[in-house]
Amino acid sequence: MPETQSNRVGQLRVFEGAVAIVTGGASGIGKSLGEALAESGCEVVLADVDGELANNAADAIGSRGLKATAASVDVTNFAAISKTIDETVKRCGRLDYLFNNAGISISGEVLAHRIEDWDRILDVNLRGVINGIQAAYPVFVSQGFGHIVNTASTRGLVPVPLSVSYGATKAAVISISKSLRAEAASAGVRVSVLCPGAIKTPMLLGGRYHQDLQPELGAAQRKNWQRVRPMDPDIFARKALRQIARNKPIIVIPSWWRLIWWLDRTSPRLSILLAQKQFERLKRSTVARKN
């Protein structure tokens, strides 16, 4: 529905009294975002493919006297995410935020990928975000307010070997977010993209939503991530909400990752060379351990 003054029902709430949906809200960054939003006075819907885990997370928030419900949602299914959004708006009378956060990771060289691996990560990480946008954006335009927050990654900003498929999806999410932000501004709709660095989540540690196509290399890569002291997801969520409240377009946390991003923009050739050298060292160390 095109925006008109008559179909505006209010203004975006930050965050007291707001309503937010967080996909992938049962664990990791999504769970921490849901908790931080609820603590800030927001009514939160934790949408996750694991309905039981989402219920547990929502119950834990509710036990503290805060507002949270759960929804079993596969983000690759447009009808499912659309239904959750419609039901939330009908029940609450509004929707202030959609956090397109659900995602998976696959590590390994491109030679180790099958086309099915590409299909899977594209479906969840990219089509899942597209489905959320296409379901929520018309609602936000009709209201005259709303904030779409897409979770990408620093691996979508800089070259990271062994994360080619993952980085490709996150780079696409960053591009979508930037262009949609420009397009949506005149309708009163905000768009931000989160670019986490190393965050201590089950995915980073090799949990159920991560797949190693080359286990030895994957284990070595995770060991490297541990050296940069991954941030606790609860700390990440609180920092992220502060920047979302300020309507920042691209949110890079921890902040020191901005230096790596700056280097990549300033000297792409050097950035790629450094990534190449790191990858070669990783492969050599893996071969040495096997021998």
Image (cartoon, helix red, strand yellow):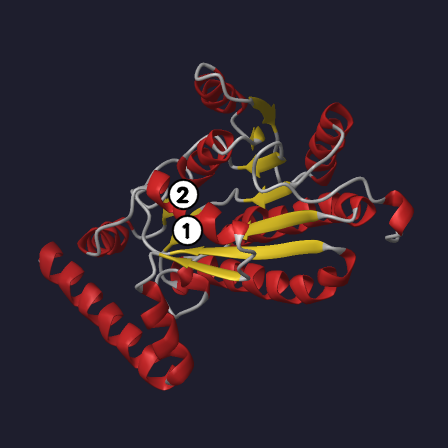
Please name the amino acid that badge 2 sits on.
Arg
Residue at 69% of width from left, 30% of height from top? 84
| Residue designated by label 2 | 238
Residue 84 visible to an observer of this rendering? yes
Q: Nearer the viewer, residue 35 or 158?
A: 35
Q: In the drawing, does residue 124 fall left or right of residue 274?
A: right
Residue at disc 2, secondary structure: helix
User: x and y percent of residue 145 in the render?
Assistant: 73, 48
Q: Nearer the viewer, residue 272 or 211?
A: 272
> Which mark is first along the chain, 2 or 1?
1
The picture quadrant where one finds residue 221 is bottom left
Q: In the drawing, does residue 281 fall left or right of residue 184?
A: left
User: x and y percent of residue 131 in the render?
Assistant: 68, 46
State whether residue 220 is above or below residue 84: below
Q: Are marks 1 and 2 in contact (CB under 8 Å)?
A: no
Residue at disc 1, secondary structure: strand
Residue most extreme to the top: 63
Residue at 31% of width from left, 83% of height from top? 270
| Residue designated by label 1 | 106
The Cα–Cα distance between marks 1 and 2, rounded to whole angstroms, is 27 Å
Residue at 36% of width from left, 51% of height from top? 213
